[in-house]
Image: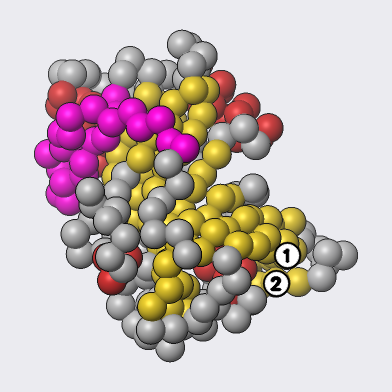
Amino acid sequence: MNNQLNDNFLTMINTPKFTATEPNIEIVYEDNHLLAINKPEGVLSQEDITARPDVLTLCKSYLKKEYNKPGNVFLGLLHRLDQPVTGVMLLAKTSKAASRISEQIRKRTFRKTYLAVASGTLPASGTFRHYLQKNTSTNVVEVVKNESKNAKLAELTYTRLQESNDFSLVQINLITGRPHQIRVQFSEEGFPLLGDSKYGSKTTGRIALHAYSLTFSHPTLKNELTLTCKPMENSPLNMFSIGIHS
């Protein structure tokens, strides 16, 4: 059994600073083109009708104050995390960076790695492949047949890192990026994520899913970067003594 995270990450994390907003969001990387943050639990990626705090609005507010920018501030939302999910998110500070990173996402060279706690004991590693369809009125994603209207292929691979008390800590590499993908696919296979009562978990509370790393080519420097965010101190992932805070 593997008791350590895979070590093939070239970590690029600046000395942390914060957005000085409410909630206060940790900034893990910033340069002239990119801004990466550690999204807290309960924060939306983008504004919706609920008026709850969202990453895009809060980070725009940070840029306006930090750099004394008048008027509107450009900030491109490159990908999303579900409201209850924590972890690293990347935003673009220029349209050129947004375009180049978006192209990597389309070509699937933009790699996303997650950590999660799943119910049950999974095989040591595996691949999940399903077709998903989202009900926009209920905001629920379902597994459907591939010939279903608007069905989207969803694929991921995982490695079990540790197991304890009928739970498994897994490292997940997304091949596609669909709404609620990890949550739905693990539930469909009989291993719902801890705390995810929306998709079959018998436990309630924080969902044990964390965006651990992003790997991509810098939009102007062209070198490969990997940005990582360790789970926060109150994360349910910390039920495992794997040393993810070391």
Residue 26 appears in view? yes
Residue 100 image position (x, y, % from top left) = 56, 21
Residue 57, compared with residue 129, is above or below; it is above
Question: Which amino acid, mark 2?
Answer: Val
Q: How many marks?
A: 2
What is the number of the mark on residue 143? Answer: 2
Residue 12 covered by magenta stretch: yes
Image-quadrant location for residue 203? bottom left
Name the residue at 68% across, 32% down: 107
- The kind of secondary structure element at disc 2 is strand
Q: Identify residue type, mark 1.
A: His
Which residue is farthest left?
20
Residue 234 place in picture, x, y as percent:
20, 64
Query: Above or below — where is 80 with respect to 206?
Result: above
Identify which residue is drawn at 31% across, 60% down: 242
For image coordinates 47% across by 64% down, the residue present is 1
Between 49 and 79, the one nearer to me in the picture: 79
Q: Is residue 17 magenta?
A: yes
Q: Assign a secondary structure to mark 1.
A: strand
Q: How far apart in space, not on screen, are marks 1 and 2 (Cα)?
A: 7 Å
Q: Nearer the viewer, residue 139 or 29?
A: 29
Few, some or many C-alpha atoms within 10 Å of disc 1 (few <14, some 14-19, many ≥20)?
many
Instruction: Determine which of the numbered discs, if any, sits on residue 3 in the image.
Output: none
Q: Position of residue 95 (x, y in %)?
A: 48, 19
Give the camera-side residue of 27 and 240.
Answer: 240
Residue beneath label 1, please?
A: 130
For the record, the magenta segment spans 8-30
> Is the C-beta separation of discs 1 and 2 under 8 Å?
yes
Point out residue 222 in the picture as x, y percentages from the top left corner: 51, 14
